[in-house]
Image: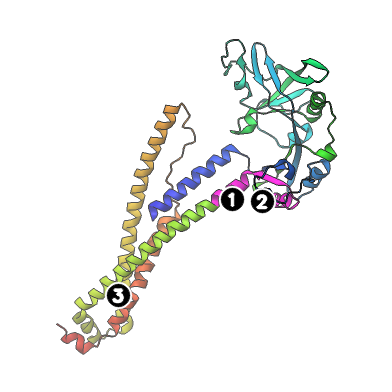
């Protein structure tokens, strides 16, 4: 039981640690119902949109510190920097709101002006030499450089595609967040809307059509669940690391319950074993019990002796189980960690942040020993009651 509980706790700690590195627990992404596809259909409020009125309502919720709409570039774009080329993953955001998110920066600042961009940590890795196809890798530094964005649209009036080129100055590079943000390019919302208007030939009607998405920032993870529930109650769909975290914790609670059930069955078997041992002890010590009663030992004294012996048996078994569980856990954890390190080395990954898959909370061994002793005491009640019911004279004559 100690081994299984330690394995479950280790997996939970490792998983939660990974989620803390991948995503921010104080952020959530909001989508309108009409933007989410459901294979099974259902009653969806398709007239509910993410317009400015909806975003103002989000800002009024307790604990919300920032809300920015997101509009994505609706036409294919190609970025150029000297001889290197990349495809654009550009998202329009409100510069004043995005500064409130306080994204960690690798260089530069998050103070975007017109036709200025804030790029993710891995955007530079997507650039490649258009002639040789060779990846730029770490050979280019986007900070302070000017990127050339080329957009293409097709018109019924012209057989040839129409191109538009704009220059984007990189004002900052965000630190790695191990997620989509690493590959994103943030641009002022009004610039993205201007490019979308050029590409589609239609000015967007935000009040009617709404934004693609919105990102909500809360002051702490403690209020994230309440904010998420409030937005969901309005009919919007919310994606957050907190919701995934709750699902993962639920899974681990089920696992721990199953492990606890297995442990409970083992303890029931152990309880019968202790009770059987104590009953046999009564038969072997019948004359001794009679002698103790003859010299003045009370029923309470006899019961206390047998309960103490039963509790001691349970405690010794608990200590042995804890030691065995800890040793097996450390050995198994070491073997599993070495296997994972070998696999990571073969794939060329980094072992940084890899934690042991076995983790034993400090309370678990103490609880196990105390609980084992209690099981022993409870198992000794029936044999102790049999012992105190023995008649002293009959016990002394017992052969």
Residue 148 found in image quarter = top right
Identity of the residue drawn at 33% across and 53% down: 323
Which stretch is magenta? 226-249
Q: Position of residue 114 (x, y in %)?
A: 80, 24
Where the N terminus falls, by quadrant? bottom left
Residue 2 found in image quarter = bottom left
Along the line of sight, which residue is nearer the eye, 109 or 225?
225
Do labels 1 and 2 touch, CB within 8 Å?
yes
Do labels 1 and 3 touch, CB within 8 Å?
no
Q: Position of residue 322 (x, y in %)?
A: 35, 55
First reached walking from the N terminus: tag 1 or tag 3: 1
Identity of the residue drawn at 19% across and 76% down: 284
Along the line of sight, which residue is nearer the eye, 60 or 55?
55
Q: For label 1, count other residues whose C-alpha is less than 10 Å away and answer few (under 14), some (14-19) or many (20+).
A: few
Q: Which residue is mark 1?
A: 246
Where the C terminus falls, by quadrant? bottom left
């Amino acid at each position: 039981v100690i081994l299984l509980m330690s394995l479950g706790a280790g997996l939970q700690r490792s998983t939660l640690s990974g989620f803390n590195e991948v995503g921010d627990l104080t952020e959530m992404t909001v989508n309108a119902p009409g933007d989410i596809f459901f294979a099974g259909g259902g009653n969806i409020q398709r007239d509910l949109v993410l317009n400015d009125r909806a975003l103002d309502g989000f800002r009024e919720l307790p604990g919300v510190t920032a809300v920015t709409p997101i509009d994505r570039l609706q036409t294919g774009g190609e970025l150029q920097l000297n001889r290197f080329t990349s495809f654009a993953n550009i998202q329009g955001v409100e510069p004043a709101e995005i500064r409130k998110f306080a994204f960690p920066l690798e260089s530069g600042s998050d103070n975007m002006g017109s036709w200025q961009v804030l790029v993710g940590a891995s955007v530079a890795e997507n650039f490649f030499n258009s002639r040789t196809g060779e990846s730029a890798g770490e050979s280019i530094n986007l900070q302070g450089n000017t990127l050339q964005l080329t957009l293409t649209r097709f018109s019924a009036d012209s057989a040839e595609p129409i191109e538009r080129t704009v220059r984007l100055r990189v004002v900052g590079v965000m630190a790695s967040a191990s997620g989509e943000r690493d590959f994103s390019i943030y641009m002022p919302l009004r610039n993205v809307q201007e490019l979308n208007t050029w590409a589609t030939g239609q000015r967007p009607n935000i009040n009617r059509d709404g934004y693609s998405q919105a990102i909500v920032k809360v002051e702490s993870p403690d209020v994230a669940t309440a904010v998420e529930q409030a937005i969901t109650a309005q009919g919007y769909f919310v994606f957050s690391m907190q919701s995934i975290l709750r699902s993962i914790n639920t899974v681990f609670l089920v696992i721990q319950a199953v492990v606890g059930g297995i442990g409970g069955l083992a303890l029931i078997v152990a309880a019968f074993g202790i009770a059987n041992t104590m009953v046999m002890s009564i038969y072997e010590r019948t004359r001794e019990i009679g002698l103790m009663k003859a010299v003045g030992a009370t029923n309470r004294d006899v019961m206390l002796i047998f309960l103490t012996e039963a509790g001691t048996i349970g405690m010794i078994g608990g200590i042995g189980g804890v030691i065995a569980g800890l040793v097996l856990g450390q050995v198994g954890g070491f073997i599993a960690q070495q296997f994972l390190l070998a696999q990571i080395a073969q794939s060329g990954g980094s072992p940084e942040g890899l934690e042991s898959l076995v983790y034993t909370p400090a309370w678990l061994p103490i609880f196990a020993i105390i609980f084992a002793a209690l099981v022993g005491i409870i198992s000794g009640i029936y044999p102790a009651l049999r012992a105190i019911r023995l008649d002293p004279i009959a016990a002394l004559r017992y052969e």
